[in-house]
Image: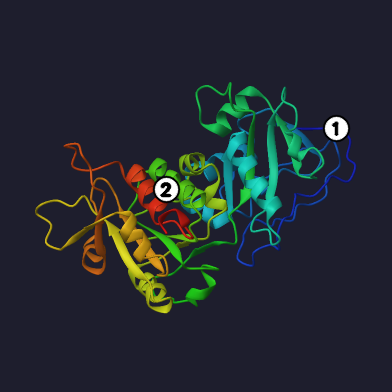
Amino acid sequence: MWSSSSFPPSSPPLTLCKPRSNSSLSLSLPTKTPNSHVDVGDGGSSAATPSIPPFHVKSITSTSNPFVKHCVKLRNSSSYRHSHGSVLIVGTTPLREIYNFQESMQEKPTTIDCLLLHEKTSVPEEFVESGVRVVRVNSMVMKKLSGLQSTESIDVVSLVKIPSTFHSLENNHHEDFSKWFPSAYRILVLDGIQDPGNLGTLLRSAVAFGWDGAFLLPGCCDPFNEKAVRASRGASFQLPLVSGTWSHLQSLVNGFQMKILAGSPGSKTESKPVSCLSHELARILTNTNVCLVLGSEGSGLSKEAHEACELVNIRMAGAFESLNVSVAGGIFLFMLQPQNKKFD
């Protein structure tokens, strides 16, 4: 299962920040001789499974390898991901986005632990001199890791720590909201967005239009879900994220004196006044801190959001009742983006 060559001191993972105190990624493995078999269990717990392969391992050839099973669990299980503080990234594009973002930051919010590279693929140019750990895998292992039937376009899978810019808040525990977001001029709030493609696309748009962070209310999918990461192109590692309740959100709104808006289809049966998104509205909000709440396509806004927010809709010429939430969200995020001089 494990294949090794010589056993010189191997380069450590590319450490881009101080390890998080609550991370369970750190695992001490006993020193092995180059040709010894490494038995790390079946991946049932962080104590039995290594976060990265032992340093002498250069390649993995079996889909039954315990580390491969660990990676598959990271891809499939949100609770397993967060208990280990680690995310499996499939493909080159989100990895490059994360790496390039890291390089632009003075304080690095995450760590790229390991690249699992197809045996016939060259190391990506960005990582040749980076010191990041590289382990080669064959096509069968790559297929198992990626979960895709065809891996022709997948050359690399990587292990990346959940960034320090992500905060998951307990229901009855209020932290200092000023620590959640460095700035709170424009915050996207997602209300029960369960589809990982929609959630990832919204996070990507938020980064593209310069929003300061995203707040995930109950019912949202994990932003580090493999499909969400793919759709976001790694934006979940760039944008400050908070997962919490309406009580936590209210602390944020009160603390930063924010106006809280919500996207609405603007149905004729709506019981509250609904404003129309416009250049004039964007201009009026130029000097106002704004929370924008977007609900799921299936359920719409939650009762709490409907009661707490000022409703805003997008005027449409066609007869459609509403837009896909990621499309509508992109329009809202663009129109209300910070420091938008086009509307002056």
- Mark carried by residue 5: 1
Mark whose residue sits in front, 2 or 1: 2
* 133 sits left or right of 240 in the view: right
Question: Where does residue 136 sit, x and y in percent of width and height?
Answer: 73, 31
Amino acid type of the residue tagged 2 in the rendering: Leu
Which quarter of the picture shows residue 115?
top right
Coloring basis for residues: rainbow
> Image quadrant for the N terminus?
top right
State the image coordinates of residue 342 (x, y, percent, origin top left): 44, 53
- The span from disc 2 to disc 1 (Cα, nearest Å) is 45 Å
With respect to residue 79, does 54 lie above or below?
Answer: above
Disc number placed over residue 28 in the picture, else none: none
Q: Nearer the viewer, residue 206 or 316?
A: 316
- Residue 191 in sight here: no
Measured from the top left, where is residue 171 in percent x and y? 39, 71
In the rendered structure, which disc, 2 or 1, sits on the residue that comes first in sequence? Answer: 1
- Give left or right: position of 203 versus 50: left
Find residue 181 and report its horizontal and vertical position in percent. Answer: 52, 67
Label 2 sits on residue: 202
Do we see residue 248 in this rendering?
yes
Mark 1 neighbour class, 10 Å CA radius: few under 14, some 14 to 19, many 20 or more: few
Query: What residue sits 64% from the left and 44% below the top?
Result: 159
Q: Quadrant of the C terminus?
A: bottom left
Q: Residue at x 37, y 53 (%)?
A: 220
- In front: 243, or 270? 270
Q: Secondary structure at mark 1?
A: loop
Q: Amino acid at mark 1?
A: Ser
Element carrying mark 2: helix
| Residue extending furthest toward the front | 344
Badge 2: how crowded within 10 Å, few (<14), some, or many (20+)? many
